[in-house]
Image: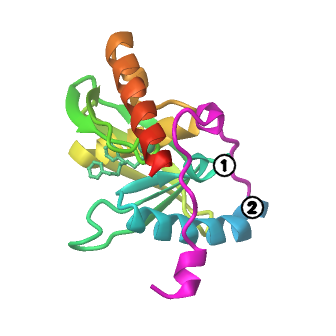
Amino acid sequence: MSAANDASILPILIVPDPVLRKTSRAVTPDDLPFVRELAAKMFATMYKAPGIGLAAPQVGTLLRLVVMDLAPDKMPAPIVLINPEVVAASEEKAAREEGCLSLPEQYADVTRPARVKVKYRDLDWVERSVEGEELLAACLQHEIDHLNGVLFVDYLSSLKRNILLRKLAKEQKEKAKR
Ligand code: K2U
Ligand code: ZN
C-alpha cells in the first residue's frame, strides 16, 4: 500500500473511549470541504478494517457523518450520509448478530426495526433518502446510533453487556502486552 494511502488510515476509537458516548453535531454547508476530505479517509479506514460502515465519532470527529459500503468485495457501492435521520421505521422487528469496529471481536444479537427509511444530505448537500431492510437496515441504524453516542451493547441485558465489556477490556489489555 502506498504511503499516501497509509496517511489516510485513521485510528478507530475503542470502547470505553468517552468520545464514543458523545452526541455529534450536525454538519453545515461550511463544513463540506473538510467533510469531503474526512469521508475519503473514513472510507480508506473502513475498507482496511474491514467493515461495511463507519461513523465520524469512531475516528474522533463529532460530526453527523457516516460512510457505508455493504458489499465492498462484490460490487462496491460507497455511500456518504450527512446528517442522516430515520424518518420511518417498521413495527416489525428483526434480530441480527452485530459487531462494531469500536468493540473489536465482540458480537451479539441485536433486535431493531426490520425496515427503515433514512433522510440525509450527500456531499453536494443534496437531500436524499434511502430505504432498507436486512443488513442495510441494521447498518443504517447502527451508524446513526453512533452519532448519538449509542452502541449496540446498549440493547443487551446489563448482564450480557457487562460480560461483553469485561471480555473486550481483557482482550485489549492482552493485546497491549504483545
Ligand atoms: O462499527 C461499525 O459501525 C461498523 C459495523 C457496521 C455494522 C454493524 C452491525 C451490522 C451491520 C453493520 C461493523 O463492524 S462492519 C463489520 C461487519 C461486516 C459485515 C456484517 C456485520 C458487521
Ligand atoms: Zn459500530
Rendered location of residue 106, percent (x, y)? 32, 37
Classify 10 Å Cα crowding around label 1: few (below 14), some (14-19), many (20 and above).
many
Q: Name the residue carrying label 2.
A: 31
Q: Which region shows up in magenta?
A: 1-28
Count of numbered badges drawn on the protein:
2
As drawn, the label of residue 7 is none
Quick check: 146 left or right of 17? Answer: left
Q: Residue at x 58, y 63 (%)?
A: 10
How far is the residue under mark 1 from the one under mark 2?
9 Å
Q: Name the residue carrying label 1.
A: 63
Quick check: 114 left or right of 104? Answer: left
Residue 108 belongs to magenta span: no
Q: Residue at x 43, y 22 (%)?
A: 154
Q: Which quadrant of the view contains residue 160?
A: top left
Whether residues under marks 1 and 2 lie with C-beta atoms below 8 angstroms apart, the answer is yes
Rendered location of residue 119, percent (x, y)? 48, 47
* Badge 2 amino acid: Asp
Rendered location of residue 34, percent (x, y)? 72, 67
Mark 2: secondary structure: helix
Quick check: 43 left or right of 27? Answer: left
Q: Nearer the viewer, residue 132 or 171?
A: 171
Classify 10 Å Cα crowding around label 2: few (below 14), some (14-19), many (20 and above).
few
Q: Nearer the viewer, residue 123 or 12?
A: 12
